[in-house]
Amino acid sequence: MIHRNFSLLLLFLLGILSLPANAQRMMNLAEGDAQTLRVESEIQSVFISDPNVADYQVIDRRTVVVFGKQMGNANLIVFGENSRTLASRRLIVNKSMVHIQQQIQMKYPHSEVTVYNLGEQVVLSGTVATEKERDEINLLVGELLGKNSLDTDVEWKLGDNNTYKMEFMQRRRFEGVVNNIEVASTKQVNVKLSIAEVSQSFMEKFGIQLGSSGQNSGIFVNPLRQFSSSDILTLISAIGDDTVGQVLAEPNLSVISGETASFLVGGELPVVTIVDGGTNVLYKEFGVRLEMMAKVLRDDKIRLSLMPEVSSLDTQYSNDTYNLPALKTRRARTTVELGDGQSFVLGGLLNKEESELLRKIPFIGDIPILGALFRHTETSRNRTELVIIATVNLVQPIQPSSIQLPSMQRTSTLERFFALDPEKSRVEQQLSQQILATGGFKQ
């Protein structure tokens, strides 16, 4: 017995010395799983480093069956005549994935997900219908395997020092689990945002007109279903008076489900700081900013987080060395859940400004005491409200051939002066009819 073990050990050492540097390959096995290994020459002997982890059975002169027994690693070497190495495998025995595969099929019968071992990693592959289903399968496998989890947080920066954690955007991964599951159809969300600044007096009058109807005596309150959020912007544009209201920005952003997007219309304000006797210049962004996060849930429900911000230059603070401007900022953050095509209105961000106007007769108004009779001071107070209207839609990319572009035929000065018809052929007339049929766009 001692002689036999000594001979096998000698064959094992000789086999290792005769192997090329990259000749050893890996064989992944599950507990109780078996694989067949075929070699090109007749087998003389087989060596395995740890029979408790895996074992073998020689079937015929050129075939060996290797089966896993318990989790661990082992080396398998097959020898031929003259101690020549026919095959060398590093055996990696992992936990069986059969029960995990059954759990996935039971809870998600319409998914096509496969779980298998690759070295010391567990790999998930296949396709699912939604992103939420992919995350749930990843969570199920990680918890069944008892793997350590690591959460990747998505945070929003509020001001200079504060942050806010977005829990619904949190992503969890597990050590030793590779998630290669793909979503069959990636969801994309389009957010059309309208940011308007409206005087509060206009909003009050508009609210009274909205709540009053009928010719009977008294006031009747109409339900909001008779009112579209875009009507506010329509009224502001129709009035055409910036003192009543103005549309600051109308960004239109599209984002993949689970990702973020940002938008900025404005500029950068230089801020001078003194550190250790030196002067540093930092730039702070201002204007109309939008940051958004979107995630599509089941039944095409959209969970949307918005953080609009409107900042403008305020009163300047001066000293003997610097003239430092300040920023006036209005910021909101909200998380809502909407259906495809639905909208919501966010308001209540008020701003109050006071200004004084001095009117006087030149020279006479500057006379002490008597000049007060020729001076007039006015104080005005202006209160505005920031109104934010957001509409979400699920969108899909289209083919370039489906994009309709504007088309226009230029006319000469002579044709415009004599009011001549620019259509000089029947083909051009048919082209004009086609453009009108498609709403003024050429396909």
Image: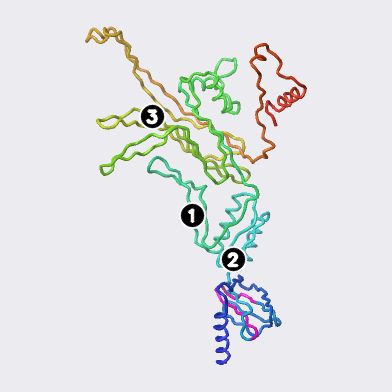
Give me the residue at 52% from left, 21% from top. 206
Q: Compare residues 267 and 48 and report the one nearer the observer.
A: 267
In primary-sequence order, the first of circles 1 and 3 is: 1
Q: Compare residues 210 and 264 and report the one nearer the observer.
A: 264
Q: CA distance from mark 2 to mark 1?
A: 23 Å
Residue named by callout 2: 118
Tag 2: amino acid:
Leu
Give me the residue at 58% from left, 19% from top. 213
Q: CA distance from mark 3 to mark 2?
A: 59 Å
Q: CA distance from mark 1 to mark 3?
A: 39 Å
State the image coordinates of residue 134 (x, y, percent, origin top left): 60, 53
Tag 1: amino acid:
Asp
Give the main secondary structure of the magenta stretch: strand
Q: On the image, which quarter does residue 25 sit in?
A: bottom right
Q: Are marks 2 and 1 in contact (CB under 8 Å)?
A: no
Give me the residue at 76% from left, 21% from top. 425
Residue named by callout 3: 313
Circle 3: is it few (<14), some (14-19), or many (20+) Cα within 10 Å? few
Segment tinted magenta in the rendering: 66-81
Q: Secondary structure at mark 3?
A: strand
Give me the residue at 58% from left, 86% from top. 8
State the image coordinates of residue 18 (x, y, percent, origin top left): 57, 80
Q: Secondary structure at mark 2?
A: strand
Q: Secondary structure at mark 1?
A: strand
State the image coordinates of residue 244 (x, y, percent, origin top left): 48, 20
Residue 267 versus residue 81 in the image, above or below: above
State the image coordinates of residue 146 (x, y, percent, origin top left): 53, 64
In primary-sequence order, the first of circles 3 and 2 is: 2
The mark found on residue 151 in the picture is: 1
Q: Residue furthest right?
A: 426
Q: Compare residues 47 and 328 and report the one nearer the observer.
A: 47
